[in-house]
Image: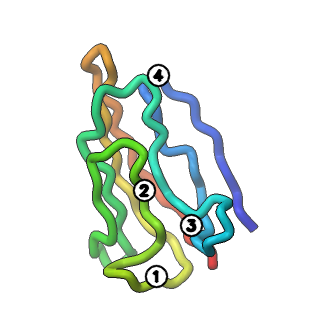
Amino acid sequence: MTIISMVRASVGSLNQAGFTPNSDGINDILRPIAVGVERINYFRVFNRWGEMVFSTTIPGKGWDGKLNGIPQAAGIFIYYLEMEGLSGHKLEQKGTVLLSR
């Protein structure tokens, strides 16, 4: 079961509470929504041991649930996101996301 939590923000946000990277084309990628964003300073995902499993600064790019090509086990992951809006203000967001298989 996939749960999506919608979050509205003036600069964009991560609006997924969970994702299911099972290649069905539905909710397969974890990525921030970059609406009204000048740049993504960082989007990082960590496993429960603190190992960074994904990092990007490219809008639209997201995590497919793999580390070095190996699918990660279902569980809770921590993300950190910092984006800069068109007017220069920053949005920092952190939270958890559920990877379901």
Which residue bears the numbered disc 4? 10
Above or below, 45 relative to 90: below
Q: Which residue is mark 3?
A: 98
**Amino acid on which disc 2 is placed:** Gly
Q: Position of residue 62 (x, y in %)?
A: 42, 56
For marks 1 and 2, give the CA distance.
15 Å
Discs 1/3, front: 1
Q: Which mark is residue 62?
A: 2
Q: Quadrant of residue 66?
A: bottom left
Q: Is residue 11 above or below residue 82?
A: above
Mark 1 and mark 3 lie on one chain; the one further toward the N terminus is 1
Q: Position of residue 51 (x, y in %)?
A: 28, 75
Q: Quadrant of residue 27?
A: bottom right
Q: Nearer the viewer, residue 86 or 89?
A: 86
Please tell me which of labels 3 and 2 falls first in the chain.
Answer: 2
Mark 4 or mark 1: whose residue is earlier in sequence: 4
